[in-house]
Image: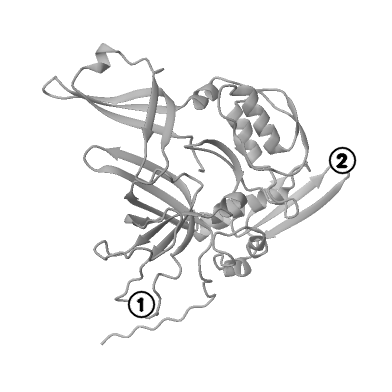
Amino acid sequence: MFGAPLICEVIITDGNDLYDNLPFKNNEILDIEFYSPGGDVVSKKMRMFSHSEVMLNENRKTSYYKLKFCSIETLINMSTKVSRSYTGTLSDIAGAIWSDTFTGSEPIKTVPSYGEHTIVLPYDSPFSHIKKFSRKAFSDPEENLCDFLFFEDFNGFNFTSINSLTSQPNRAYFRYQDPNTDIKEGDEANVLKSTYIMKDVSLKGSRDLIDNIGRGVYNSFVNITDIKNKTYVAERLNFNDLFPVKNNLNPDSPFPASVVDEFGPLSCYGHKFVSQYSPTSSMKRSSVMGSMFFNKIKFECGGNSSLNVGDIVKLDFVPQSAQTTLDEKYDQYRSGNYIVSQISHIINRQTGYTISIETCSGSVSKPIPEKSEFESSRR
């Protein structure tokens, strides 16, 4: 969701010497279709762009190599440059660029942005233009909030905001617990009517104070110079002031920002000139995007073809019962709603269909106290 377009990798064990008999030309088309029981059917047409990592077996009768595929739009984008003028909202302009460039493709899915613009585009690729729009498009006209993203999922390309993504209903429910524990039917409600056990869980949240201060997550300060009107002003942004305007995955419970009051505005972004894009919106984007990785969890589970990047999932963690003194069914701070930021669908002849999911969230289910008290006695 925050990175590269959709990629498909196919690992081949070749006993027919296809590598030499075909041979591969890097323009082959792959039609792929798969699904999980009760899930959506995924059907994609992709084009090869790489065949590499060739290994020859010692018996000289088998070779191993990897084929890589991407969407046709990704390849067209690499060989296309756009330079012309557009007028309208940035989401409308993104849609216009898409329809003008990718004439044989499905339309890009957009949500409305606010503010009219007349833009003369420099000579650059369509994806590059749309990515720049995502950093400047307003999802909330009153709060001057820029939180748009440009990404690809199984259904195509999207130009949408975090605000719109976090307002979706949950798509699936996952639980981290002893895999030998029985799960009763209907124990938890979820859209897909099924419960999944998380395996190989890794907590990768960004809790680095120095890094977050430097990226302007907690606070920002910017100088604004208007040469035409000969004015100079300064604007500040505070983490605590921002989060009431953001549609949190777990309402009213962002991470504690007492660090803001303690250290003050230590991040600074300099702007020499006033433009049609408010510097405040850039500061807010840095805070919103950075905070999305406060809680970052990666895990594996059984295959689910209905899950896409950008979907909302519910995660529950059974607490460390041997250590906890609280009467809680689930961990009160790790459990909650998350957004799927990255997902890999893995189909293997030996292990079957599994998925590797990376989720993120900038809030928790229960407010974390500013001060904590904990006592431990040893006998």
- In the figure, 107 relative to 224: above or below? above
Identify the amino acid type marked 2. Lys
Q: Which residue is mark 1?
A: 324
Q: Quarter-wise, where is residue 160 in the image?
A: top right
- Left or right: residue 30 versus residue 134 is left
Query: Which residue is found at the position 14% from the left and 20% from the top?
Result: 61
Q: Mark 2 and mark 1 in contact (Cβ < 8 Å)? A: no
Distance between mark 1 and mark 2 Cα atoms: 62 Å
Q: Quadrant of residue 212?
A: bottom right
Rendered image quadrant of residue 13 = top left
Q: Which residue is mark 2?
A: 228
Give the mark nearer the N terminus: 1 vs 2.
2
- Quadrant holding the C terminus: bottom left
Q: Position of residue 228 (x, y in %)?
A: 87, 40
Category of crowding for the residue at label 1, using alpha-carbon neighbours closer than 10 angstroms: few (below 14), some (14–19), many (at least 20) = few
User: Which residue occupies the extreme right position in the image?
Assistant: 229
